[in-house]
Image (spheres, helix red, strand yellow):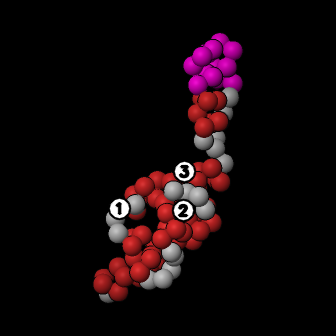
């Protein structure tokens, strides 16, 4: 995303040369990295990371890596699992 931000600044530096000639769009991988980073910052002090450790799903070190976005695959797996569990709990409470 840093390269994307720098490329967006080019249009403002020289609008006659770069203005209106670029269409910048980050791909799905970089978008998912940003989503995982935002989710990690949201979950950091919510207690969900403590639930991951207490349930035996992940260790303390892995939870810190998930929150800090060191392991993208583990982070995606953890957030998907959490979403499935919370959805199941919501559905059982609703019905």
Q: Which residue is label 1 attached to?
A: 45
Number of marks: 3
Q: Quadrant of residue 26?
A: top right
> In the image, residue 56 lies at what x, y percent?
48, 83
Tag shown at residue 34: 3
Q: Is label 3 or label 2 in front?
A: 2
Against 65, is 1 above or below?
Answer: above
State yes or no: residue 35 in magenta: no
Q: Which residue is label 2 attached to?
A: 65
Tag shown at residue 36: none
Q: Residue at x 35, y 86 (%)?
A: 92
Q: Secondary structure at mark 3?
A: helix
| C-alpha span from label 1 to label 3 | 19 Å
Q: Secondary structure at mark 2?
A: helix
Against 52, is 36 above or below?
Answer: above
Q: Are marks 3 and 2 in contact (CB under 8 Å)?
A: no
Tell me which label, 1 or 2, sits earlier in the chain. 1
Q: Nearer the viewer, residue 92 or 65?
A: 65
Q: Residue at x 46, y 53 (%)?
A: 38
Magenta range is 9-21
Q: Is label 1 or label 3 in front?
A: 1
Tell me which label, 1 or 3, sits earlier in the chain. 3
Give the dominant element type of the magenta stretch: helix, strand or loop: helix
Against 23, is 10 above or below?
Answer: above
| C-alpha span from label 1 to label 2 | 14 Å
> In the image, residue 30 lies at what x, y percent?
63, 50
């Amino acid at each position: 995303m840093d390269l994307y931000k720098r490329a967006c600044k080019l249009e403002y530096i020289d609008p006659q040369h770069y203005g209106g000639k670029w269409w910048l769009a980050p791909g799905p991988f970089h978008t998912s990295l940003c989503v995982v980073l935002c989710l990690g910052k949201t979950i950091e002090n919510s207690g969900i990371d403590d639930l991951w450790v207490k349930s035996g799903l992940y260790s303390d070190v892995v939870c810190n890596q998930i929150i800090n976005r060191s392991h993208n695959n583990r982070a995606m797996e953890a957030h998907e699992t959490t979403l499935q569990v919370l959805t199941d709990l919501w559905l059982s409470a609703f019905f």
